Structure formats: structure tokens, C-alpha cells
Amino acid sequence: MCAVSYREVERAVHRLEGRRTVLSLEPTTLGTILESVRQVAQTAGVADRGATLADDLRARLDAVAAATADVAVGPRVLALEWLDPRWRPGTGCPRWSA
């Protein structure tokens, strides 16, 4: 919600000289974040490095999951996008809200 619109980015990029690629990434899970890593690397011409990084990150996440599999109560976490006013993530940007 706080991000510049895709259309605005495209307009700005077309003013630049040379060929440009615009990626619109909207990951919502750890899996789609890892897929975004792969997509950026592919676009940058370093697909193997992106695949290696994504695989390494997945292995680290799997290791944490395995190490905490027997934990009865998960951690309690509070995530805030803004402190003042308090604003939870994913609800839009308070400075642009009506």
C-alpha cells in the first residue's frame, strides 16, 4: 500500500535510456519470498546464484523448524509497520489512508 504504483514505476523507467526490466514482486509467504529471490536472480542473469541462495535459506528455515518441532508453545510476536500511530502490517500505509 505504501509502495509506488507499478504504473508509476513503468512510466519512470521508460524515461530512462536503454532497456529496463521491471519486476513486480508481492511475496506473502516464506515460500514466495524464496521464489522472488529466484526470480530476481534469473532476471539479473545469475539464476544459479539465486537458486543456491534460495536453497540455502530454505535449508536454514527447515533446520529451525526441525529444532523447534517439540516446542509446545510458539513464540509470541508483535509486528508493527509504524509506531506512531501504531499500525499493523498489511493494512495499508497510514500516511496514505483516508
Image (cartoon, rainbow, N blue to C red):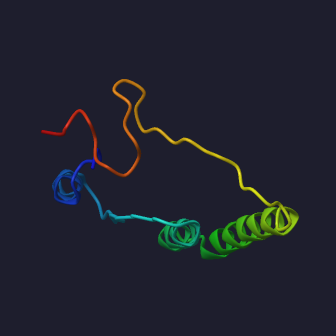
Residue ranking furthest to the top:
84
| Vertical arrangement, residue 47 with respect to residue 21, above or below | below
Toward which corner of the image does residue 51 lie, by quadrant?
bottom right
Location of residue 50 in the rendering, given as x and y in whole percent from the top left corner: 63, 69
Relative horizontal placement of residue 12, taking residue 25 as reference (left or right)? left
Residue located at (38% from left, 31% from top): 86
Residue ranking furthest to the left:
98
Residue located at (65% from left, 46% from top): 76
Location of residue 35 in the rendering, given as x and y in whole percent from the top left corner: 54, 73
Residue nearest the viewer, comparing 86 with 56: 86
| Vertical arrangement, residue 75 with respect to residue 68, above or below | above
Location of residue 12 in the rendering, given as x and y in whole percent from the top left corner: 20, 50
Q: Quadrant of the C terminus?
A: top left
Residue located at (55% from left, 68% from top): 41
Location of residue 19 in the rendering, given as x and y in whole percent from the top left corner: 30, 64
| Vertical arrangement, residue 37 with respect to residue 51, above or below | above
Toward which corner of the image does residue 13 lie, by quadrant?
bottom left
Toward which corner of the image does residue 5 lie, by quadrant?
bottom left
Residue nearest the viewer, comparing 80 with 46: 80
* Count of numbered circles in the view: 0
Relative horizontal placement of residue 97, taking residue 61 as reference (left or right)? left
Residue nearest the viewer, comparing 2 with 56: 2
